[in-house]
Image (tube, rainbow, N blue to C red):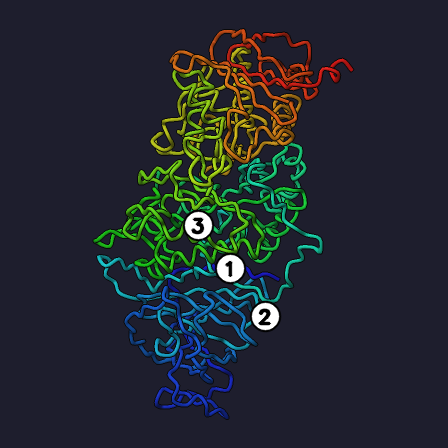
C-alpha cells in the first residue's frame, strides 16, 4: 500500500545513530567493529543517524561494509566541475535497540535520482558547490500507512567516497523497493553575494525524484504546512498500455486544442461524479464523451507537475486567502501532481491514474499536450523564499543571478530558472523525455518560453541551446512543441521565436487583432484578414507552416469568452491585490452594460459576439485553441487573473452546460466538426491566390469593419465567409459559385438556434445577402442537383 507523507519540520528534536545489527557495543575509542567481515577495515565511514522525537541523545559513526570501484563512473562535462570538499564533523553517539541491517557502498553517479541496482537502491544528486550532503530516509513501520514512527534516518555522505565530480551518490543494499520517502540536507558556502543559499536545516526534494509525496488531499487545510519528499516504486508491475495501443499521431494542421485544468474540469458537484474522483485524472476519463461531442482532438492540460496549492498561505500577504488551482509553481519536474490522483491515494496511485487517463484519451483519438513551467519554480524570491529543492541544492547553478548574487526575475514570480546552463538544460531535457517515454504524452506548451531564450546572465540569445536541443532531440521528435513567446522581462518573440522549423507559437497578435475587429475597432480589417489567413507576416519564414501559429481568442490567463463580451474592465477585487493584478489591455467590449444583465437585446448581442469569435477561430488557417468552459459561456465575473480560486470561478459548471446544450454548445460543437470536415480551413502551406479570393477593394478605408472572402476547395465546394463588425446591416453582393453549384447558408450568427447552424444548408440564397450588425455568415457551394433533390 502507498506510504503516507512525512509531515516533518525543517528541524527535528533529537538524533540517535542506527547501525547494522551485527555492530558491537560502543568501544572506548568511539568506533565500532563489524564481526566476521574484514573487508571494510580502513574505509572512511558514512554516518547514520535516526531522527525521532524524545530526549536528545548522542550519535556515533557507522561504516561501509565494502567498497565499489568508482573508476567506472565518469561524469560528462555538464557535471564535471569539482567543488571544495568540506570536512564532516564527527559526533559522539550511542547504539539504539531498533535499527536496519543495511550494507552501504559508495554507489554511482548516474543515473541521477533513484535507481534500482541489483538488490539495492542507488541515490544520486548534483550539487557543485555543496560541502556536505546528507541523505534522509523515512521508512514505514512494518508497512503501515498510518504512522511514520520509525522517524527519519540520516546518512551523511563522505566527499572522499560518495562524490564523483559534482555528483553525490550512495548505494544501499536491501533497502525496500517502495514505500520509502527520501530527501537531502545540503550545506555549503553562506555567501549570498556569491549566489549561495544553502540551509542544512531544510530537507530538500531531489530534482530527479520521479514521484513526490506531500499532503494527500487537495486543499486539506489541516495539512496546510505539510512538507514534500521524494519517493520511488520498483515493486509495481509496468503499466499495461495494451497490445493494440498506439498514440493518435494527429497532424499539427488538423489539431483542435482544448485548454483545460484537470481539477477544475470535474471538481464541481454538478459533474455528477463520485466525490472520490472529482477533480482527478480519473474524473477526466469519465468526461471524455463530452470532449468527443464537442469535437476537439487534443487537450492542453494546465500544469500537472507536483505543486503546493497552499503556497500563498505560508505567510500573511494579500493573496493568503487563495488556493493555487492553476499549478504554475513547480516543485518537481518529473512527478505528476499527486493530489490529482483519486481518493487520497498518493503519488504512486496518481502516476498510474495519469497513465490511465492518457491511455483513455488516446483510445478516443485525443492527444495530450502538457503546459510545462520551466521558467521558474515555486521557491519564490529572497525576500520570502519557499525553499523546497533547487535553491537549497545549488542556487548558483539553478537560477539566474545578477553580479551581486541576487535572483533575476524574468518570470514575474521571484526567480528565473537558469535554462541554458548545461546542468539545468540536461534536467529539462531529461524531464521532457520522461514524460514522453513514461507517460506517453504527445507534446508540450512552454510557459513564458522566452525565458528559455536567455543566457545565464539573462541576456537574450539568438540561438538558445535549450531551444535547439528540444527541437533536435530524438525522443521528442514526434512531439508537438509550442512556445508562449514572451516573458515578464519584455522579451516578446511572437513571430520571431527561435524555432528550427519545429516550434509552434501561441500567436498573441492573433488574439489581439481578432478581438479588436470583432468588437468593432476601426482600422484593423487588414490585420484581421492577415490573422485568419494564417499570419504569413509572422510565420512565412524558412520552412515554417500556418499550423505553427496557435490561434486563440481566449486562454486561461485572461477573460473567459463570456466575460470578453460582458466587461470593459477587469474586476479582480476578489484576488485581494486592489485590482493591480491582471492585464489592463483586454480589448473587450461589454456590449452596452458592465456585467450581468437581464436586458434581452444585450444578451442577444453577447451571444452573437461569442459565436462570431468562435467562427473566426475555427475558419482561420493555423491551429485553433479554445478554453474549457467557453462551449457553454462560463463566466469568472470579470476576473481576468483567477489562478488562486479553487471555486466556481474556475470550475467547469456542468449544470450550466446542460442548460445551454440546445443552443450555445450546439453551435460550438457543430462549427468545430465542420472545420474537421473541410480541408480548406487547414492548409499545409500558406494560402496562394488560387486558395483564396478577397472580396475587397477598400483595404485602405480606416472606417471599414466588413470583410468577405471565398476559400476555394479542390472539389469545388467553396466556402464564402463574411464578417460584419458594423452596427448596421451590410447588403453583400455574393460572388458567382462554381459551375453547377449554388450557395447555401450553413452559418448565420444572427439567427437563433438551430437556424444559426444548418449542416445541410439553407438554399434559395440569391445574389445578395443582408448581413446583420455584429454578425457573420458562412455559405457553402453545393451541387445544384443535390439542392433540387
Q: Position of residue 371 (x, y in %)?
A: 49, 44
Dot 2 crowding, Cα within 10 Å, few <14, some 14–19, many 20+: few
Residue labelled with disc 2: 142
The kind of secondary structure element at disc 2 is helix
The kind of secondary structure element at disc 1 is loop
Q: Residue at 48% across / 33% down in the picture? A: 555
Dot 1 crowding, Cα within 10 Å, few <14, some 14–19, many 20+: many
The kind of secondary structure element at disc 3 is loop
User: In the image, is residue 762 above or below residue 24?
Assistant: above
* Camera-nearest residue between 728 and 198: 728
Cα distance between the residues tagged 1 and 2: 24 Å
Which of the numbered marks, if any, corresponds to residue 210? 1
Q: Nearer the viewer, mark 3 or mark 2?
A: 3
| Residue 592 visible somewhere in the drawing | no
Residue labelled with disc 3: 330
Q: Position of residue 125 (x, y in %)?
A: 41, 66
Amino acid at each position: 500500500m502507498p506510504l503516507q507523507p512525512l509531515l516533518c519540520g525543517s528541524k527535528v528534536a533529537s538524533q540517535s545513530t542506527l547501525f547494522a545489527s551485527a555492530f558491537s557495543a560502543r568501544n572506548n575509542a568511539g568506533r565500532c567493529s563489524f564481526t566476521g567481515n574484514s573487508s571494510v577495515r580502513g574505509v572512511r565511514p558514512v554516518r547514520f543517524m535516526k531522527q525521532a522525537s524524545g530526549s536528545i541523545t548522542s550519535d556515533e559513526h557507522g561504516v561501509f561494509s565494502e567498497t565499489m570501484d568508482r573508476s567506472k563512473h565518469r561524469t560528462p562535462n555538464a557535471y564535471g566541475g569539482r567543488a571544495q570538499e568540506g570536512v564532516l564533523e564527527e559526533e559522539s553517539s550511542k547504539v539504539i535497540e531498533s535499527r536496519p541491517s543495511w550494507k552501504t557502498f559508495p554507489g554511482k553517479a548516474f543515473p541521477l535520482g533513484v535507481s534500482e541496482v541489483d538488490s539495492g537502491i542507488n541515490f544520486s544528486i548534483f550539487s557543485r558547490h555543496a560541502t556536505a550532503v546528507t541523505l534522509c530516509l523515512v521508512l514505514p513501520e512494518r508497512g503501515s500507512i498510518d504512522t511514520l514512527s520509525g522517524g527519519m534516518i540520516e546518512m551523511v555522505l563522505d566527499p572522499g567516497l560518495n562524490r564523483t565530480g559534482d555528483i553525490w551518490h550512495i548505494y544501499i543494499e536491501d533497502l525496500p523497493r517502495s514505500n520509502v520517502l527520501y530527501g537531502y540536507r545540503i550545506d555549503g558556502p553562506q555567501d549570498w553575494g556569491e549566489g549561495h543559499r544553502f540551509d542544512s536545516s531544510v530537507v530538500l526534494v531531489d530534482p530527479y525524484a520521479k514521484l513526490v509525496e506531500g499532503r494527500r488531499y487537495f486543499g486539506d487545510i489541516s495539512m496546510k504546512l505539510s512538507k514534500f519528499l521524494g519517493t520511488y516504486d520498483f515493486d509495481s508491475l509496468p503499466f499495461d498500455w495494451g497490445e493494440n495501443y498506439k498514440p493518435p499521431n494527429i497532424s499539427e494542421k488538423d489539431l483542435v486544442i482544448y485548454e483545460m485544468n484537470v481539477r477544475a474540469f470535474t471538481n464541481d458537484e454538478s459533474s455528477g461524479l463520485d466525490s472520490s474522483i472529482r477533480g482527478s485524472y480519473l474524473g477526466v476519463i469519465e468526461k471524455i464523451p463530452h470532449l468527443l461531442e464537442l469535437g476537439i482532438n487534443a487537450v492542453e492540460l494546465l500544469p500537472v507537475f507536483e505543486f503546493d496549492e497552499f503556497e500563498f498561505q505560508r505567510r500573511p500577504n494579500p493573496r493568503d486567502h487563495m488556493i493555487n488551482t492553476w499549478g504554475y509553481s513547480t516543485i518537481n519536474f518529473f512527478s505528476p501532481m499527486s493530489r490529482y490522483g483519486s481518493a487520497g491515494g498518493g503519488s504512486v496511485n496518481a502516476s498510474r491514474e495519469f497513465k490511465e487517463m492518457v491511455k483513455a484519451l488516446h483510445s478516443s483519438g485525443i492527444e495530450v499536450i502538457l503546459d510545462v513551467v520551466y521558467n521558474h519554480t515555486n521557491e519564490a524570491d529572497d525576500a520570502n523564499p519557499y525553499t523546497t529543492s533547487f535553491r537549497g541544492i545549488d542556487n548558483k547553478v539553478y537560477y539566474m543571478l545578477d553580479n551581486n548574487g541576487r535572483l533575476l526575475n524574468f518570470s514575474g514570480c521571484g526567480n528565473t530558472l537558469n535554462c541554458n546552463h548545461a546542468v539545468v538544460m540536461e534536467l529539462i531535457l531529461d524531464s521532457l523525455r520522461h514524460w514522453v517515454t513514461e507517460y506517453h504524452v504527445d507534446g508540450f506548451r512552454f510557459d513564458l518560453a522566452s525565458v528559455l531564450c536567455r543566457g545565464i546572465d539573462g541576456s537574450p540569445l539568438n540561438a538558445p541551446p535549450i531551444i535547439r536541443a528540444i527541437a533536435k532531440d530524438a525522443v521528442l521528435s514526434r512531439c508537438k512543441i509550442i512556445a508562449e513567446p514572451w516573458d515578464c522581462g519584455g522579451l516578446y518573440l511572437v513571430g520571431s521565436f527561435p524555432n528550427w522549423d519545429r516550434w509552434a507559437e501561441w500567436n498573441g497578435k492573433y488574439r489581439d487583432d481578432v478581438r479588436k475587429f470583432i468588437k468593432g475597432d476601426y482600422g484593423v480589417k487588414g490585420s484581421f484578414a492577415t490573422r485568419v489567413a494564417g499570419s504569413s507576416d509572422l510565420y512565412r519564414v524558412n520552412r515554417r507552416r500556418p499550423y505553427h501559429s496557435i490561434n486563440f481568442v481566449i486562454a486561461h490567463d485572461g477573460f473567459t469568452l463570456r466575460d470578453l463580451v460582458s466587461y470593459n474592465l477587469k474586476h479582480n477585487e476578489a484576488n485581494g491585490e486592489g485590482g493591480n493584478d491582471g492585464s489592463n489591455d483586454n480589448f473587450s467590449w461589454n456590449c452596452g452594460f458592465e456585467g450581468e444583465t437581464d436586458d434581452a437585446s444585450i444578451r442577444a448581442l453577447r451571444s452573437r459576439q461569442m459565436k462570431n469569435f468562435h467562427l473566426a477561430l475555427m475558419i482561420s488557417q493555423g491551429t485553433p485553441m479554445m478554453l474549457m468552459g467557453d462551449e457553454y459561456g462560463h463566466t469568472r465575473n470579470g476576473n481576468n487573473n483567477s489562478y488562486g480560486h479553487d471555486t466556481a470561478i474556475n470550475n467547469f459548471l456542468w449544470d450550466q452546460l446542460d442548460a445551454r446544450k440546445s443552443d450555445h454548445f450546439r453551435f460550438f460543437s457543430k462549427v468545430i466538426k465542420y472545420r474537421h470536415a473541410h480541408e480548406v480551413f487547414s492548409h499545409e502551406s500558406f494560402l496562394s491566390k488560387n486558395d483564396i479570393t478577397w472580396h475587397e477593394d477598400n483595404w485602405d478605408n480606416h472606417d471599414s469593419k466588413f470583410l468577405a472572402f471565398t476559400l476555394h476547395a479542390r472539389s469545388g465546394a467553396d466556402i464564402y465567409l463574411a464578417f460584419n463588425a458594423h452596427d448596421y446591416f451590410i447588403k453583400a453582393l455574393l460572388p458567382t459559385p462554381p459551375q453547377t453549384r449554388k450557395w447555401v447558408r450553413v452559418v448565420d450568427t444572427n439567427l437563433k438556434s438551430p437556424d444559426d447552424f444548418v449542416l445541410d444548408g439553407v438554399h434559395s440564397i440569391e445574389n445578395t445577402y443582408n448581413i446583420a450588425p455584429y454578425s457573420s455568415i458562412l455559405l457553402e457551394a453545393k451541387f445544384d442537383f443535390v439542392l433540387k433533390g
